[in-house]
Amino acid sequence: MKIGLFFGSFNPMHIGHLVIASYMANYTELDKVWIVVSPHNPLKEQADLIHAHDRLEMAKLATEDSEKIEVSDVELKLPKPSYTIDTLTYLSEKYPHHEFCLIMGADNLKSIKKWKNYETLLKYYKIFVYPRPGVDLSEWIEHPSVFITNTPQMEISATFVRKSISEQKSIQYFVPEKVIDFIEKKGLYRKSN
């Protein structure tokens, strides 16, 4: 089975993430998409990151009705910081019957040369890229491991969602209802946090 790994903090999971996952699972050669909730991206600030288990639960709530999208906690069990290449190596050894591919945004592809063992990633794994506004991918168009998709673009971010919640603005339609309920029940992303 060909599985696309969609890594992220998903802080929180919103419809932009779901559009990407759904497109990759249904409009590419991938059979399934695994949402991989990361403890902390070594290249990003940790300031607004809520507990990984809450982010994992929100991802599960958002995708529980999907047959082709699953949520994985693999990175929460591996040594920190988590590097994509280490996770891929671990999964490839644990599930040798699966072919793992990466799903990433054009912005991440632009910075991939900063990643640990990026040459190995590009040599052994296919990368399915979703576009980002204003990101030029011309240097990657001919790369044999890189597949630039026509995933619909949405101008929505987890930062926008968190800011909206802290300002007590509605996030209806930006975030799945089950995730909104979870956020409200736990009082997540309030200014007092």
Image (tube, rainbow, N blue to C red):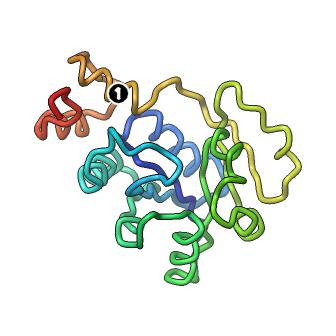
Task: Classify residue 61 as left or right of residue 141.
Answer: left
Crowd around label 1: few <14 · some 14–19 · many ≥20 (10 Å): many
Give the residue at x 25% y 39%. 179
Residue 116 in percent (x, y) is at 63, 63
Residue 33 in percent (x, y) is at 51, 57
Q: Amino acid at mark 1?
A: Val
Q: Quadrant of residue 123?
A: bottom right
In the image, is residue 95 above or below residue 75? Answer: below
Disc 1 on helix, strand or loop?
A: helix
Residue 94 in percent (x, y) is at 49, 83
Residue 190 in percent (x, y) is at 19, 29
Nearer to me, 133 or 40? 40
Give the residue at x 63% y 45%. 108
Give the residue at x 55% y 72%. 86
Task: Classify residue 68 as left or right of residue 135.
Answer: left
In the image, is residue 69 above or below residue 82? Answer: above
Residue under pointer 1: 161
For the N terminus, the quadrant is bottom right
